[in-house]
Image (cartoon, helix red, strand yellow):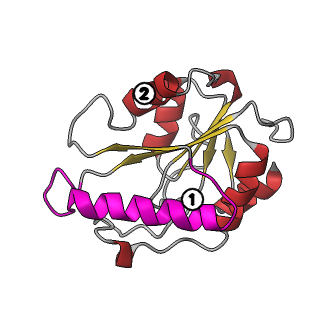
């Protein structure tokens, strides 16, 4: 069993967006800020993460842009507003990495966005890093990158076996992870 009690400000958090921080539309995308709805406890969780963790980065696939159904300006507005609300609640996001392409080395489970984060933040130590996600793609991203702990939230993918080898820990929601730190 991986222990979250040893986590301190030397640790990095990689975190997915849709289905982790906010409602995820089944087989569709969050296109506008009006559609973006934080899950309960998310802002409080980010306040705790801000106090406990070093670097906090969002790693999100957003291929709705490549498909032409989400406007890039709307995606930027979603992230701007999301970040402002989290900061207003005492939280922090150091950087948001987005892959808008259909196929790319940046698209999870590939590690491009994680490698970019490591370039931008050379102090990232993968042996002191967490990945929180709600898909096996998120968990494989964590494994492929080499993070220490993959945390799975079964918010939208109830069919995924919780004993999957890419999953280290399971929590119901983000605030439960934060409170376990």
Q: Circle 1 sits on which residue?
A: 154
Q: Is residue 81 magenta?
A: yes
Residue range highlighted in magenta? 64-93
Q: Position of residue 31 (x, y in %)?
A: 28, 68
Q: Element under label 2?
A: helix
Q: Is residue 38 above or below residue 73?
A: below
- Residue at 33%, 33% (x, y): give it: 106
How crowded is the residue under tag 2: few (<14 C-alpha within 10 Å), some, or many (20+)?
few
Q: Is residue 73 above or below residue 139?
A: below
Quadrant containing the N terminus is top right
* Quarter of the figure with residue 116: top left
Image location of residue 134, percent across then percent down: 51, 53
Q: Is residue 72 left or right of residue 3?
A: left
Identify which residue is drawn at 75% across, 30% down: 10
Which of the pair 26/177 is nearer the observer?
A: 177
Q: Which residue appears at 67% of the width and 67% of the height?
A: 89
Q: Is residue 158 visible?
A: no
Q: Is residue 28 magenta?
A: no
Q: Position of residue 29 (x, y in %)?
A: 30, 64
**Secondary structure under the numbered disc 1 in the rendered image:** loop
Q: Position of residue 142 (x, y in %)?
A: 53, 33
Q: Which quarter of the figure has residue 108?
A: top left
- Residue at 58% x, 34% y: name it: 165
Residue 61 lies left or right of residue 130; in this view the side is left
Q: Quadrant of residue 85?
A: bottom right
Q: Nearer the viewer, residue 89 or 129?
A: 89
2 or 1: tag closer to the N-terminus: 2
Q: Give the label on residue 64, or none.
A: none
To which residue does mark 2 refer? 116
């Amino acid at each position: 069993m991986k222990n979250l009690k040893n986590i301190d400000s030397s640790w990095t958090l990689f975190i997915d967006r849709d289905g982790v921080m906010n409602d995820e539309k089944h087989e569709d995308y969050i296109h506008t800020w009006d559609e973006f709805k934080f899950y309960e406890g998310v802002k409080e969780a980010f306040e705790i993460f801000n106090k406990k963790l070093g670097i906090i980065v969002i790693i999100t696939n957003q291929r709705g842009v490549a498909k032409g159904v989400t406007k890039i300006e709307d995606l930027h507005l979603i992230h701007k507003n999301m970040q402002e609300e989290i900061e207003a609640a005492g939280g922090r996001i150091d950087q948001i990495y987005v892959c808008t392409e259909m196929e790319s080395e940046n698209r999870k489970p590939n590690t491009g966005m994680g490698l970019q984060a490591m370039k931008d933040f050379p102090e990232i130590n993968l042996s002191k890093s967490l990945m929180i996600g709600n898909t096996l793609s998120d968990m494989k991203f964590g494994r492929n990158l080499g993070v220490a702990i993959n945390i799975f939230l079964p918010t939208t993918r109830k069919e995924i076996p919780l004993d999957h080898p890419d999953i280290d820990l399971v929590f119901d929601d983000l605030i439960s992870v934060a409170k376990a730190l």
